[in-house]
Image (tube, grey):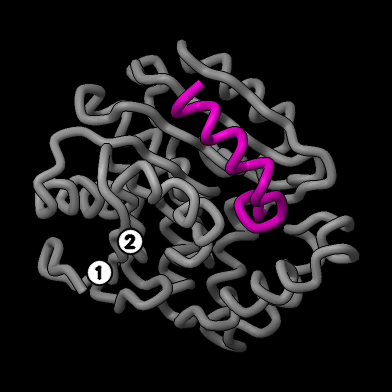
Amino acid sequence: MIKINRKNLAVEIHGEGEPIIMIHGLGGSSNAWLPQYSVLSRTHKVIRPDLEGSGRSPLKGRISIASLVKDMFNLMDKLNIKSTHLLGHSMGTIICAHMAAEAPKKIKSIGLLGPVAQPPEAAREAIRERARIARKQGMVPIADTLLQVSISAETRSSNPAGTAFVREILMRQDGEGYARTCEALSEAKAANFGNIKCPALLITGDEDGVAPPQATIAMAKRIKKSKTIILSGCGHWTPIEKPQLVNDALLDFYFG
């Protein structure tokens, strides 16, 4: 545990070299990055926090995108990191974009998997409804629903271990922490993409309903130095559903 902004965050650190901070999404944890950290920690210092109220990090108070961004900047200060690469998934990509826009000199690159600029207006109430379900019924109905809509048909049929992992990581979330994170996401606003100066890699799946290819391509056009990759047979849990293809893309991004 590392004390950040009067709260405790669970943080795992592996490897040496230029730092990469990996920021998970809603319902995720640092373990969502296991396939990537195992490769990138050979050449980089990989830092994987559990965001407040997610995974092993306890809930302290109200959560917002701004508070999560502040936590990540303070984590950098705590670890004496002057500049870093960022890797985000889903809601984590919103955090990455805000960090890159707010402090361009501190961010060397951003890798955005299942990238989201902000929730569409139609989705905001659905996210708030998910918060209500988490409080009243717990995580099981949420996990079972998302298993059907957030991963691809190919993953469900050919990758049972990955499917089981997604269900387990969702079911292990604290209901109130998940609910407050839902509320933070439902209020999220897009970063100022015009302020992002670093290289960006955007990866999404052709079956990703949260970050569909057309929305990802549109987002990439708002970032000056960007590249987009669309993965076939992949839903929204990009790091888990297509780990080898994601790793190959990241290695090419960092070393190509």
Q: How many marks?
A: 2
Residue 68 percent location from the top left of the image: 30, 54
Residue wearing tag 2 = 49
Q: Amino acid at mark 1?
A: Leu
- Assign the magenta stretch its main secondary structure: helix
- Residue at image x 12%, y 62%? 5
- The disc at residue 27 is none
Secondary element under disc 2, as helix, strand or loop, is: strand
In the rendered structure, find residue 9 and report the number of the disc placed on it: 1
Pick the front one: 19 or 150: 19
Question: In the image, residue 183 lies at what x, y percent?
Answer: 45, 62
Reply above or below: 240 against 147.
above
Dividing the image into 4 quarters, which one contains the N terminus?
bottom left
Query: Sequence-wise, which precedes: disc 2 or disc 1?
Result: 1
- Out of 157 and 146, give the one closest to the viewer: 157
Q: Residue furthest front?
A: 42
Name the foreground residue: 87 vs 27: 87
Q: Is residue 156 above or below residue 154?
A: below
Q: Is residue 36 left or right of residue 97?
A: right
User: Hey, what amino acid is under mark 2?
Assistant: Pro
> Where is residue 98, by image quadrant?
top left
Q: Mark 1: which secondary structure?
A: strand
Are the residues tagged 2 and 1 within 8 Å (C-beta)?
yes
* Crowdedness near tag 2: few (<14), some (14–19) or many (≥20) residues, C-alpha within 10 Å: many
CA–CA distance between discs 2 and 1?
7 Å
